Structure formats: structure tokens, C-alpha cells
Amino acid sequence: MLDRPHDPGPAGPVPRPQPLGVLPLPLGYLLVPAGPGSDPARAELLAGRIPGSWPGAMRAHERAHAGDRDGALAALAADPDQGPVTRYNRFVLDPDGASPAALRAELGELGVLVDLVLFALGRTDLPPDDRGATGEIAALVLSARATHALGTDGPAAAVDLLDRAAESASPVSRPLAGLLAAASAGILREHGDRRCVPRFERALALLEDADGLGVGRAEVHLELAGALHEQADDRPDLLNAAVPHYHSALQLVRREDAPLTWAASHAGLATAYLTMPMVEASGQLRLGIAAQSLRAAMTVYTREDHPAEWASLQLNLANSLVYGPTAHREENLVDAVEIYEAVLQTRDRDTDPLGRARVLSNQGTVLAHLGAFDEAKARLYEARFLFEEHTDEASVRAVRGVLDEIARQVALARTAEHGNAPAPAPG
């Protein structure tokens, strides 16, 4: 039984295209009603920008953008129209307050949006069908189908659906098309497909003027930087191409806006700088910047909340202290030893033997530089054993080289201490 009488026909004049899917939920699923002043605001939202002023008919949209759900619901309750568009917008904000079947019938050709909201909220497992849908609505439906296909038909099917979605969105909203292109690129990157790079680049071109999508654009820059970084094993020059995208991401977001995106951008930038070959004087400056970015990232990636990221950043920070420019060389080496010691607590011999061995090797090498030869040898012997146990011959040779150098330094010290006097006879 329906909750209230309704008109089974279309929901009156709803201006198209609608800025659906451009901004995050809930604003990104609210319909913009027809009314005085609504068209300029709708155009701004379609372009990925937040209106400079909100018309009275869009007070609920303004409050939703500000994160004030209760205020948005109050604005809708005060709307004198109370037609299907208002009821649909209230449903987006409070899906338990309406009958989906009645609302779907009231909205007519826009009724598919009810099913999209239910799917987006996880209240149904199946996305709606895109037959009969056009423009931005077709794009949203195809995007929902891609999400479903990813778990049922595989990444190729999902990418194909997202490509179709971007094509439907392109004539009506470049930012929506850009977000969909970025989504397909993300799937390709996750599966090691290098075709992701031109798709990310296309997405950024489509999002170029979307000033209201700072976080979304930053995430695409970060994804592209990461993809280039991953491919730098074969093409080291791609590291230089990745760095500007890390910088762009950091220019678009602040820590308080999107802490994980901000921290990941700092971490990626630092790793890129630490990986670049030290072939010119600017390399020393890069190491200094890398250390600053690592410390910034660790304000978000804490040991308690993000132990894996914390340990990785700590290792990179220790390495930057060892190799970076400084007037306090010995102090930096002591700090590095302490950092390695903290990381060792997260590298279990049984579950991560090679990870533990690498930390021990680094720590032993630094201890050797500090002249703490006995402590250095203890760390290096354990590292060598773990490398030998797991047949990492290159690392075994590197550790042996450090141990040989320690033995040479000890012998030289003894010679200097005793002059040329013969060593005392054993026993």
C-alpha cells in the first residue's frame, strides 16, 4: 500500500541536466528544483564549483554542503511546494522517512534515482537498469552497475561500464566525466594495467576547472603520481614526472580537509625524492625536503592507527637522516639508530624475517659508522643469518662487506694503539 496519494506521471518540470554525482553524497544526489535563481547555481554545480550564493529554493543544498543534515531536512520541511522533488531530496537525507515505491512512481522517468540511492546506501544488492536513462542519469546508473560488476564479472566489465558512463556524462558535465574516467583508471592501476596513466591524465584535464572538487582532484593527482612511481622501476625518468603530481595534490588539500590523502601525498613525495639518484647538488636539498614530508605524514600515520605506514615512514626517515645533508652528522646517526630500534619492534622474525633483516642491516651499518662495533656486529650477524636462511645472496654479500670493513677498522685501531709491537702469545 502506498503511503499517500500520488501522481503516477512525471514529477513536473525538473530542469536537466542535473548535477548528480559531481559532488559527494548527500549533495551529489540532491535534485535542483526549478525556481528563481536556481539555474545559475545548477550550472556552477555541474561545472564542479560551489555557488557563490545559494538561492532560497536551494537552502537545503547549502546546508547539506555544509554537513548540516538536520538543517537541510528543516529547510525541506519548510519548502511550501512539498512536491515530488522535495520529497525525493528528503529521501536522500532520510531514506527511512519515505516509501521508495511511492516516490519512484511520483518521480516518473526520474524514479530510477530512488533505486540508485538505495544501492549507494547498501540497501539493495542490485543496481538499477540503465534502459531509457540519458545523460547524467545514465552515467550514474552505469557507474553503479560498474561497482556491481567489479565483484561479479571482473575488472574488464567494470571498466567498460565506466567508459560508457563517462561518455554519457561528457556532453552535460565535464567534472562528472572526469570522475568516472578516474574511477576506470583506478581499476586498471589496481590490476597493473599501464593504460591507467592516460586515463588519469584525461580525468585531470576534465576536472581542471572544478574548483569545488579539491579533494577529488587531489586524489586523482595522487593516483597518477603513484602509477608513474610504480612504473619507474623500468623507466627511472618517470619519477620526475610523478613529483609534480604529488605537489599538486598537496596544493589542493589541507591536513584537516582530507588527512589520509594529505599524508599519502607527503609520503609519496618523500619516497620519490629518496629514490632519485644523487647525481647533483640539488639531491641534497631533495633529501631535506623528503625528511620534512616524512615528519608531516607521520602526524597522520601514527603507530597506533596505521602501524604499517608508520613503520615504512620511520625507515625512510632514518635513511634520510643517514644520507641527508647536515651539520650534526653524529646526532643524526644516533637518531637513526633509535628509529631503527623502534621499527624492529614491528618486524617479527617469524612473520617478516627479511623485513627484520633489512632493518638490522641498516642499523648495524649506522652503528659501525658511529664506532659502536660490538653492537654493530650483533645486528649484522643476525641480519646475515636471516638473509642466508632465505637465500638472499646479494644482501648476504652486502652485510659481509660491512663486517669485513669493521674487522679492518678494528685491526687498524689495534695497530695504532700498540704500534708495531708483536701481539701477545695466546693463553
Image (spheres, rainbow, N blue to C red):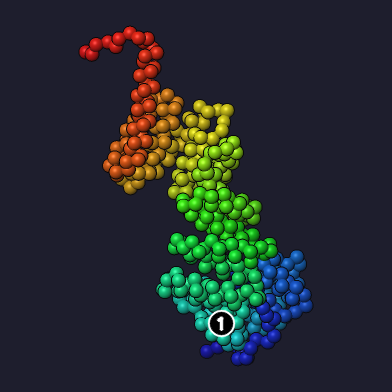
Q: Nearer the viewer, residue 135 or 106?
A: 135
Question: Secondary structure beneath disc 1?
Answer: helix
Which residue occupies 38% across, 18% down? 412
Q: Would residue 240 be seen by someone viewing this image from the given angle?
A: yes
Which residue occupies 54% across, 61% down? 197
Q: Would residue 375 be seen by someone viewing this image from the given angle?
A: no
Where does the image place residue 167, in percent across and percent down from the top left?
58, 75
Which residue occupies 53% across, 79% down? 115
Question: Which quarter of the figure is the C terminus placed in?
Answer: top left
- Return the residue at label 1: 112
Q: Nearer the viewer, residue 69 or 190?
A: 190
Disc 1 residue type (three-letter)? Val
Where does the image place residue 188, in percent across and percent down from the top left?
48, 64
Q: Indicate whether 114 appears above or below 415.
A: below
Task: Give the left or right position of residue 33, taking residue 233 as reference.
Answer: right
Q: Indicate whether 311 appears above or below 11.
A: above
Q: 10 Å neighbourhood of mark 1: few (<14), some, or many (≥20)? A: many
Which residue occupies 46% across, 63% down? 193
Q: Indicate whether 175 appears above or below 137.
A: above
Q: Nearer the viewer, residue 146 or 3?
A: 146
Where does the image place residue 87, in percent across and percent down from the top left?
63, 80
